């Protein structure tokens, strides 16, 4: 779980997780919206500065922004 006090060049969640998408199961925001790449679902859209998110990964990985 993390909050986004970050400012990536591209805040689209698909772009943010592109480098580690093979290990990503699902990302949820505090409102129940999801980014679920296996099923092509993305109801989150862009990361919002200061909002909370939770990611479930298949294996440990490092997301560098």
Image (cartoon, rainbow, N blue to C red):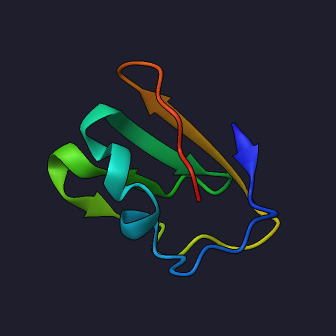
Residue positioned most to the left: 39
Q: Can you see residue 12? A: yes
Is 59 left or right of 60, judged from the image as shown?
left
Which residue lies at the image location 47% right of the left edge and 29% below the top edge?
A: 61
- Quadrant location of the C terminus? bottom right
Is 9 left or right of 50, judged from the image as shown?
left
Image x and y of residue 17, in percent? 41, 55
Residue positioned most to the bottom: 9
Image x and y of residue 24, in percent? 35, 37
Please determine whether, in this image, residue 18 is positioned above or below residue 12.
above
Which residue lies at the image location 76% right of the left edge and 62% below the top edge?
A: 51
- Quadrant location of the N terminus? top right
Query: Which of these two is toward me, 37 or 34?
Result: 37
Is 3 left or right of 25, judged from the image as shown?
right
Which residue lies at the image location 76% right of the left edge and 72% below the top edge?
A: 49
Image x and y of residue 14, in percent? 36, 65
Q: Can you see residue 43? A: no
Q: So how many labels did they put on this image?
A: 0
Which residue lies at the image location 18% right of the left edge and 44% below the top edge?
A: 38
């Amino acid at each position: 779980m993390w909050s986004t006090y970050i400012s990536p060049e591209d805040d689209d969640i698909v772009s943010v997780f592109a480098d580690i998408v093979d290990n990503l199961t699902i990302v949820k925001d505090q409102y129940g919206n999801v980014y679920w790449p296996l099923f092509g679902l993305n109801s989150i859209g862009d990361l919002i500065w200061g909002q909370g998110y939770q990611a479930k990964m298949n294996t440990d990985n490092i997301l560098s922004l």
